[in-house]
Amino acid sequence: MQRASPRVVSTDVVVIGGGCAGVYAALKVQAEGLAVLQIVKGFAGRSGASIFAGNLQLQSTKDPAEEERFMAIRARYGSSYLNDPDYIRRACRFTEDVFFPEMEQRGLYLRRHEDGQLVTSHDRKAGNVWAPNQGFSGTMIMELLRKDLLAHRVPLLQETMVTSLIVRDGAVAGVTALDIVRGEFFVVRAKAVIVATGPGNYLATRSTATREQCGNGFAMAWRAGADLQDLEMQWFHASDIAAPKSWMRLHLYPNPMPVTDKAVQLYGSDGGMFFHLGMNPKVKQPYYLQLRYLYNEVKKGSASWVGGFSGSYTHIEPEIMENYSYQAQFFKHLGIDITKDRVACGITWHMTFGGIRTDNRTMATTIDGLYAAGGCGSHGVGSITYVSYDGTVAATQACERARRIDLPPLPVDRVEDEHVRVHDRLVPRKERGLLPAQVKKRVRAIMSDKMGYVKSGPRMASALDDLADVRERLLPAMGVGSTSRNWNYDWVEALDAEDMIDVCELTIRMSMQRKESRGYFFREDYPYIDNKRWLKHTVARRSGDGVAFEFTEAAPIFRPENEIDDFLTADY
Amino acid sequence: MEAGTLSATIFRFDPSVDDAPRYDAIEVTREPMMRVLDVLDAAVDECGLSIGYRYFCGVKRCGMCGVNVNGKPVLACWEAATPGMVIEPLGNMPVIRDLIVDRGAFERATIELEPRLVRRKPYASFPERYTHGDVAPTFPLMNCIECYVCSSTCPAVAGGVESEGRRAFVGPGTLVQVAKVALHPKDELDRREMLEDASIEDCMSCFRCEQVCPVGIPIVSAAIMPLRGLAASAPRGRARFPQTFADNVRSHVDVHSASLFIRAKGWRGALASLPLVLRMLVRGKTRIFGRAGTEAKRRVDALFRAAGS
């Protein structure tokens, strides 16, 4: 069929994503005097993971001994020794010296006491602050950043999905995109591209990621030839609300509430408490430990991976919930009295520690001119404050490149192939075919069922078979409900479905490579932490149509004492 | 209706292909504590309808899932689903498709009113010195997620935010965003003229915005009234009108248009309009002296006191 040639626009730097990393990157490119185009699948500051940042880490970096102690804690309890402490150090310093002062100048209100002191947890050592309440900090930060973006007139396309990265001779030449509101496919030529699509991906039935986050950043980087890293290091939440369904992202925080040293306690269906913060006093953010205790509870038969356990705040003074928690109003709205009642919880697919492989000093990927900033990078960020550093670094590098090179020519064939691929997804469903949203739901169900917290070789192999079945049987009959080009989200979801299957398959295959357990990654067939063989990153590289795996050493700054630790009893 | 199911009616309209809107009746499996958003998700998954609806977070952070349910504007993620409910797009905004509206006019109005802190004094260092008490006036406004559910139902913006010539009333959602910075202890921008341009006097204090705010912000008392107070001393004095009108009724029992005219427009404005005033006098549309008795005045005054103004 004859298609009109797509519109082509040009800029210096494209930023993909509208969270904190993306906004920081776009503001920085504009401040450097170069042309930027920010493209957001949802809305800048309103979609994506950043709006969910509940706690803000404020770590003093002025006392070297204190800073060193924090790095050691972060390496052990925050990443099971996979983080690069040097990256964390740079991100922390940026947070203290740049991010917090800039955000406060913009009007961020970090909660204060009547005497002007910042509100922290009880011991004032955990380093968390809130803006202005626990559970709302990221929303307030993103509101202020969005206003800055709009006031500075940063060229911004919202409700626009980047469908592919255009690469020529190993270097990025631009992106292709679909304007969701008008249904127009177009091309952006650029000298550098920054992917900032976040750490969260809605790849399981219950997920903390937002609606639009479907692994698109990973999928487009992979198809363009970039290396991915540590996708198996998928984090989970054990204490998110069970019902209503759409509130699956409502989090009961396992780390201390403001002004207390208390956090949510977990109970099994037999009424017994199976997790509280005091069980491991050294661990201030015991998300991964909750899951290991939950595993024991499931073994005992007093919880299951689809629910049957609960969380409670009954030990916390009601006025503290009322004064400092954004979440409190949700329980009240459901008629739950949190001074007396427990809240039914469920397990949720949370952020990915891994992502697009980057050099954490430059945010450069393995493709020239392509940078990955924030949670979609592979250095295990997990903090809205740190990603402002990523965005700034990536933008600085991208600007340096943009000043140095001419606009690369477009590989016309690649663009035309992508145009055809996107166009072919705007096809009506066949008889008994599913809507794309229905296919996505089935992919998520497979991942929940067979790629949940507890993994094993056979279950993962079976998940791959199920995904292959979706690809071969469901995708060809899948189609849109209407071929209108006017805000046709079916069309977007058809592209999502393909991206999701690609990313889920890669995640499974990388998980099969790692023959140990670590952090949130639990293989029932390898239930020990193997520090001798696996203080390593898993790297996936494209090899023809297949995948080649490589393993690289994790930064050797801090090391665990033991070569082997029992996963279920270790505290890291 | 079967037990274990929930029925609803959903507004459908794609202006690019449909001549007129229609309504789809659906029936979906009932789930525990189901929200309106869960029903929309189920309408796609169970009924195979490709309905256009917007949301990102599902838990009252993104502010993008506003819809009308049985005529009341709500956030779909927050509102409990009820049997037989009718789900329609928000008002005061053009429909893009089905339940999706174009929020552009409100968002542009917000950004044009400089909803950012403007500092004159240099920022010292982090953390800045101030107490919780210092930000108390702006604190209740910080939870605003700009869902514009309030603006969608405001009678003062029914004619649209961007009518030609004078800018029409910008709506309560925008004013909350402006008040959040205007009442911040570190903001030093003179926002009075801007507020006049935003036609802040058009707010009728009907409190509809407060009744529907999904995060419970006291919009009129915590945002609009303080802003009106600020704007009252602006050069053109338009924002004084609501107070002038109230004073007029209070002292004359009825609207006394002649004195209202003079108070609102000033002597010069009133003189320029002298022919009109004279015609009104001749036709008995206004009078020079009020005619209310002392008892009536006392009772009206008591009403005003009771209303707290």
Image (cartoon, coloured by chain):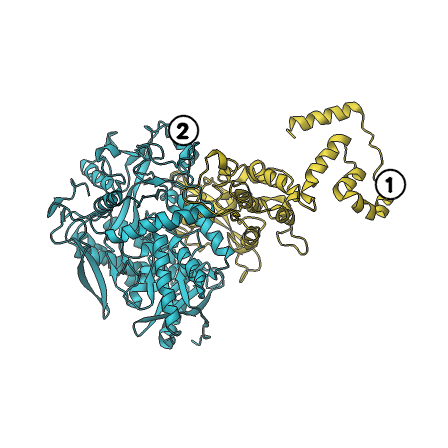
Residue A386 in view: yes
Q: For the N terminus of chain A, which image quadrant? A: bottom left
Q: Secondary structure at mark 2?
A: helix
Numbered disc total: 2
Which chain is rendered yellow in the image?
Answer: B
Does residue B173 appear left or right of residue A212 in this picture?
A: right
Judge the density around disc 1: few (<14), some (14-19), many (≥20) Cα neighbours within 10 Å. some
Work out which residue is located at the far top of the displayed protein and give it: B295
Residue receiving disc 1: B281
In the rendered image, the vertical position of residue A350 relative to residue A356, given as above or below: above
Taking B281 as reference, is B162 above or below it? below
Discs 1 and 2 share one subunit: no
Instruction: For marks 1 and 2, give the CA distance.
Output: 62 Å
Question: Within 10 Å of the Cα at label 2, are there few (<14), some (14-19), or many (20+) other Cα atoms?
Answer: few
> Residue at (25%, 53%) from the top-left corner?
A86
Q: Where does label 2 land, which residue?
A: A319
Labelled pair 1, 2 in contact (Cβ < 8 Å): no
Tell me residue A103's x, y (percent).
43, 48
- As helix, strand or loop, the secondary structure at mark 1 comes to helix
Q: Colour of chain A?
A: cyan
Q: Amino acid at mark 1?
A: Leu
